[in-house]
Every structure is written in C-alpha cells, then in structure tokens.
Image (tube, rainbow, N blue to C red):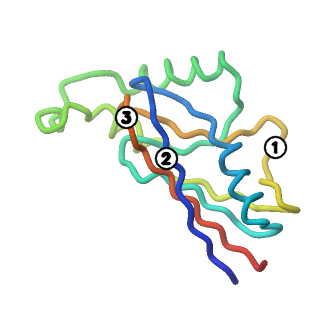
Amino acid sequence: MKILNKKIHITTNNKTQMINITGEIQQIIDNENINEGLINIQTKHTTTAIIINEDEEGLKDDFIKFINDIIPESEYKHDRIDNNAKSHLQSMILNSNQTIPLINGELNLGRWQSIFFIELDGSRMNRVVEITILTKD
C-alpha cells in the first residue's frame, strides 16, 4: 500500500463561501497517475468544512442563507476572544473531511456531485486542505 499526501492552498473572498475544489483534486490524482484507491480530503481549520453537493448557483446561495439562518450572529461567549464563535459553531454541524473511492483514475462521485471547501470565517489568504491518498499502485 502506498500513501500520498498533498495540499491545496485556498484564498477566500467572502465571510461565507462555497468553493468547488473537485478539479484541483482530480488534477492531483491525474498528476500522480493513480488508478485505484481511497482519497481523504480534510480541512485544517476549525471554521471551515468539506462537503459534497451540487455545484449550482441557486443552491450555493440557499446553503449560505441556510447555514446563517440556523446559526445566526448572537452574543456567544467565544466572541470575547476571536469574535468568530458563529463560524466555529457552523463548522461543528458540517464535516471537516470526506473520503471518496478512486476508480479507474476518477473520483467516484455521482453525476451532480462536487467537492466543496466551505469558508465560514472569511476572507482568508491561505486556507489549507490536506489530501491523503491510499492506493495499491
């Protein structure tokens, strides 16, 4: 078994943002010539998330409205330190990682599925996503 570790660096522009990183992940798979295995995509930040969903502008707008409606700005105790408790709480109900099979050199995603990096405390200059690939190749 072979283990490969890579990083994706992301700059975000908005307080809450969905960034499709599927192409960048597939490029890593292609560059490393990986055929079969498992890939884990993990955010390295406690105010971000990794999700799989459809890349449609209306749905992305709906998601941002939804996540801000269910955990709104409030007087959170953590805000006395960093003023970003809302972002931490939002990330707690999402996923920090996703694991996807690799089959014939491709991410085994459904037709409408894409991998998103979710920014909840932007804008930020250097967000890091860790990519770990386990393969027999």
Q: How many labels does the image show?
A: 3
- Mark 1 neighbour class, 10 Å CA radius: few under 14, some 14 to 19, many 20 or more: few
Q: Is mark 2 on a helix, strand or loop?
A: strand
User: Rounded to the nearest whole Å, what is the CA distance between mark 1 and mark 3?
Assistant: 30 Å
| Among the 4 quarters of the image, the one containing residue 92 | top left
In the displayed orientation, state which residue is furthest to the front: 31
- Mark 2 neighbour class, 10 Å CA radius: few under 14, some 14 to 19, many 20 or more: few
User: To which residue does mark 2 refer?
Assistant: 9
**Disc ID at residue 124:** 3
Find residue 124 and report its horizontal and vertical position in percent. 37, 34
Q: In this view, does 5 lie above or below 116?
A: below
Q: In this view, does 2 lie above or below 25?
A: below
Q: Is mark 1 on a helix, strand or loop?
A: loop
Q: What element carries label 3?
A: loop
User: Marks 3 and 1: in contact by CB < 8 Å?
Assistant: no
**Disc ID at residue 110:** 1
Q: What residue type is labelled 1?
A: Gly
Residue at the location (70% across, 23% down)? 56
Judge from the rendering whether residue 93 lies leftward or rightward of residue 81; answer left or right.
right
Find residue 133 and report its horizontal and vertical position in percent. 65, 67
Residue at the location (37% across, 27% down)? 71
- 2 or 77: nearer the eye? 2
For marks 1 and 2 on the same chain, the one whose residue lies earlier in the sequence: 2
User: Rounded to the nearest whole Å, what is the CA distance between mark 1 and mark 2?
Assistant: 25 Å
Judge from the rendering whether residue 49 lies leftward or rightward of residue 109; answer left or right.
left
- 5 or 134: nearer the eye? 5
In the displayed orientation, state which residue is furthest to the left: 80
User: Rounded to the nearest whole Å, what is the CA distance between mark 2 and mark 3?
Assistant: 11 Å
Badge nearest the viewer, 1 or 3: 3
Judge from the rendering whether residue 55 lies leftward or rightward of residue 121; answer left or right.
right
Q: What residue type is labelled 3?
A: Arg
Q: Which amino acid does label 2 sit on?
A: His
